[in-house]
Image (tube, rainbow, N blue to C red):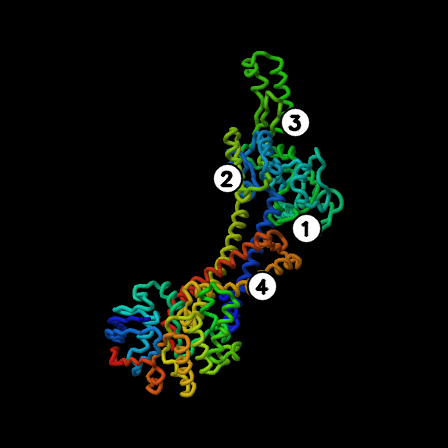
Amino acid sequence: MNIVEIRDLVKNYPLGNTTVHALRGVSMDIPKGALMSVVGPSGSGKTTLLNIVGCVDAATSGSVKVGGSETTSLTDRELTHLRLHKIGFIFQTFNLVPVLTALENVEFPLLLQGGQSKAKVREKARQLLEGVGILGHQDHKPAELSGGQRQRVAIARALVTDPDLVLADEPTANLDSETGESILRLMQTMNQERGTTFVFSTHDSQVLRYAKDVVRIHDGQLVGA
Amino acid sequence: MLVWRLAWRNLWRHRGRSLVVGGILFLGALLLTFGNGVVSGMADGLRRQVVESFTGDVVVVSDKQVDDNVFLSMMGKEVEPLTRVTSLQRLVDSLSWVKGSLPMGKNMALALHETEGSPGFVFLLGVDFQKWQEFFPGAFQVKAGRMPSPGQSGLLLPTGANEQLYQTMGQVFAPEGSVDTLLLPKDARGLSLESLRHDLVLMGYSNTMSASDQRLKVSGLGKYSSLNTIWGHFAICDIESYRSVLGYHRQDEAAKDLSASQSKVLASDDLDALLSDGDLASQEIVGPQATGNATTGEVDPIWNLLLVKIADKTPEVAAEELDSLFRQRSLPARALSWHQAVGVIGSLALLIRGSLMGFVGLLFVVAAIVIANTLAMSAMERASEIGMMRAVGATRLFIAKLMLAETTVLAVLFGGAGILLGACVVAVVPHLGITTGNDLLQMVYGGEVFRPLLRPMDILLCLLELGAVVGLASVYPMQIAASITPLDAIARD
């Protein structure tokens, strides 16, 4: 069963008087439970692909289905709902809310969802922080955490809503190799233990061994798996 | 709860910016509160010192009176005689929202020099002293001499009028007995007491050309308790003397005439013959005549104004309602609000009040623009953070609420402090005894002493104004923040 189905996806950016063709008719499926890496050099279109799949950018043409929903025809409110309930995000620069503690950052999506008791939200956030190995830093603000610790918090936050899909755009790009590998091992563990679908982009071929599936992209086109 | 927690921490994190916006809100709220206090104090002061001391809320005049400005018209243009005052007063007093009414004569009189000097002039009020004191308690402070007793003729001369008479006539007037020289015109303080004159010959300045001269004893010299620089030109005399000066029929004569007429009516069955009776037809009419009711025997003497104090209505609305009633009853009168009746003072008061409110409004807009600009810049600086929140599922509404919450927290803390301090300043200022003799400033002060005033309604108004500033200042930043997309966060990376 596919969690994501992409057909003839095209994304063009206007740049001055010219048009940048970021994606040129990409078609692919991402099966549920995958741990997929999208690999390609800088400017190849990996981030654009992840952004469109993650409903933070709109396609120029083509079809993208996430969890069965055709995202190209959804309203902003519906896309926001989809991101909140079905998709988890891990950013390259460990984007956390700076004024919230590690624990509160993990609680944040659950509080946005609403409908759960404060105690339940807190307990779930603690479990995830424990799962990513930084429960001891739960009361620290992002500025008081190292890059690796922040990325672990970001992973916990991405997983806290039990999403169908977690997207990570170059999650190890700003980390040293040792910390980067620990983050990838963590994603691998979460994928195996929880069955969460992970898609991460990278241009570092050293990290490919952690992926079950690899998709190569070049000049906006898939060039092989 | 999440929104408020985030808002509070964001404000704390960006303390510098929060202090700038908070400072603007604090100053804005302080000035708004103080401005409202000044406007309210002015309104209250004017009401107290004009309405409660001199004019009443509504002034009823003759329907023949063309000019609305009956108190302060240039060169004392004549105020038309008001007839059927008894009927008017009975009607007015029967209204539930009327607190009381007082008939009054008001016109200008020439003060004749008894030798060869130039005449002077005074604005002359004709009153029943007892009723006038009851209607305007404490409005005039007699500093020398005394207030004429009921039924006694006499003149109360304010220091302002005395000064004016001295400037034009070169004569100084004072009641008999000892007089504090400080009450006399500045240049005349060296004069001997023997040179002071104790009576004044007045002649009505009237279109009827029927005025006669009348010698009036100066009973008292003093000051109006408020706005003496303005009202100080109005001398007050008993109504009978006033009518004589203006050439109006005296009340007792009219009553006597009416009694004679009544006798004839009662003695004769032939009304036609009675109407052609030479005695009645040949009465010498030398001026506006007191009207009589042949059926009831009532005498209705001439006045110029009927002053009315009201409750629970604005003077403008009350005047309109009275006008309507007068038309229904065919009474020859119309009603003016006190603003209309005092002419330039009323207009000036409204102008000053309007200017103050305009200043407060301008402050309001400037504060809103500065705050909106600062918050909008802040929202743009935080595009990455806001975009990230949007990426993980925060709606546009959530972001808008967050911005509004941040502004609201600042408004409550700093704006609240500004209102509190403003209220304290308004409470303290009247005790500082800031006074002025300047007429224009007296309009702003609402009297001689600067007394800003804050009522619960004014504080509520301040809160509403602050709320409006916050609302207005938040709209643009909320729009900016809510329009930030998750892609903006990623693009910033």
CA separation in Å, label 3 and label 2: 30 Å
User: What residue is disc 2 on?
Assistant: B67
Closer-to-camera residue (B251/A10)? A10
CA separation in Å, label 1 and label 3: 40 Å
Say what amino acid the circle numbered 3 marks: Asp
Q: Is residue B184 visible?
A: yes
Q: Are marks 1 and 4 on the same chain?
A: yes
Foreground: disc 2 or disc 1: 2
For disc 4, the neighbor class at 10 Å (few under 14, some 14 to 19, many from 20) is some
For disc 2, the neighbor class at 10 Å (few under 14, some 14 to 19, many from 20) is some
Q: Earlier in the sequence, mark 2 or mark 1?
A: 2
Q: Chain of mark 1?
A: B
User: What residue is disc 3 on?
Assistant: B252
CA separation in Å, label 4 and label 3: 66 Å
Q: Secondary structure at mark 3?
A: helix
For disc 1, the neighbor class at 10 Å (few under 14, some 14 to 19, many from 20) is some
Q: Secondary structure at mark 4?
A: helix
Q: Earlier in the sequence, mark 3 or mark 2?
A: 2
Q: Which mark is residue B417?
A: 4
Q: Is residue B359 visible?
A: no
Q: Chain of mark 4?
A: B
Residue B373, how many percent across, how many down? 44, 67
Residue B224, how many percent across, how many down? 65, 46
Residue B96, how many percent across, how many down? 59, 36
Say what amino acid the circle numbered 4 marks: Ala
